[in-house]
Amino acid sequence: MIGRRSAYSVVDVHAHLGPYSLFYIPDPDASTMVDVMDRTGTQFTVVAANRAIQQDAHLGNSQALAAVDAHPTRIAAYAVVNPWQDPERELDRLANDERFVGIKVHPSLHKYPVTGARYDAVWAFAEESGCPVLSHSEHRSAYDAPALFEAVATKYPRASVILGHAGITPAGVDEAIEAARRHESLWLEVCGSQMTGPLIMAMVEQVGAERVLFGSDFPFIDQRMSLGRVVCAPLTDSQRQDVLSANARRLFRWRPLPEGPGVDDE
């Protein structure tokens, strides 16, 4: 391992892989990701391929599995489910391939609301199996504003849903906090270009440290920057460790994440 070892174990539950069609991302490959993880002390990262959330869910999911095969002790995969691209096929694939540890949906990119019937199979599978679902969430979005997930949580109360970015903006974080306070099945994840230490602290204080998760949005946002926001937030050591990895280990129990290198390994 390279660089100074983190004092905390770290699990990143929100990262991506591969090029993105809307703008350039330097070095978006799995090997570069693992190199950065070595420097930050991140044990494990769960990825969704950019190709999967954009052009082709099936092909992109295969790319995510290739990254798992290349780095099985450091990377796991989300199966992206696009409501317009045979979602049942990808759910069947997820159910039968243990390299997938969760589901990723992106309603804003796919222009389909989380409350729509094409997502029903996702929420039903999550409720029946215990498979966690990471969804993009965005303030004022017609597709995935945090408040929309309350209808999902009411209909599928045992489906664990991670609100990626926790609404993105400060007002979105407020909205996500209110939704999560009313529904224990909703979890908040902290990555985003507008995220700050005080916003993370507000999530912890109002929802509880046990339902806030670390994610980086790497390689859109450098993992080191996202990690620094949590490390420097005014949290207790116990709260910080919950956010950085303990909560992820509790949530991803359907297919538990590998332990990865420990903080004292060389």
Image (spheres, helix red, strand yellow):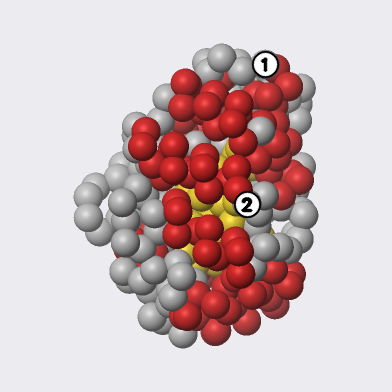
Q: Is residue 118 above or below residue 62?
A: below
- Vertical side of 99 occupied by 10: above or below: above
x, y (%) of residue 255? Answer: 75, 59
The residue wearing badge 1 is: 236
Q: Is residue 32 left or right of residue 97?
A: left
**Residue 130 shows which numbered tag?**
none
Q: Position of residue 236 (x, y in %)?
A: 67, 16
Q: Is residue 45 above or below residue 22?
A: above
Q: Amino acid at mark 2?
A: His
Q: Residue at 58% of width from left, 79% of height from top?
A: 121
Q: Residue at x 56, y 51 (%)?
A: 162
Picture coordinates of residue 133 (x, y %)?
A: 58, 60
- Which numbered disc, 1 or 2, marks the residue that appears first in the sequence? 2
Q: CA distance from mark 1 to mark 2?
A: 25 Å
For the point 64% across and 75% down, the residue is: 124
Question: Which residue corresponds to mark 2?
Answer: 183
Percent position of residue 38, x then y: 58, 31
Q: Residues within 10 Å of mark 2 (few under 14, many from 20)?
A: some
The mark closer to the camera, 1 or 2, is 2
Judged left or right of residue 161, residue 127 is right
Q: Secondary structure at mark 1?
A: loop
Tell which of 52 and 68 is nearer to you. Answer: 52
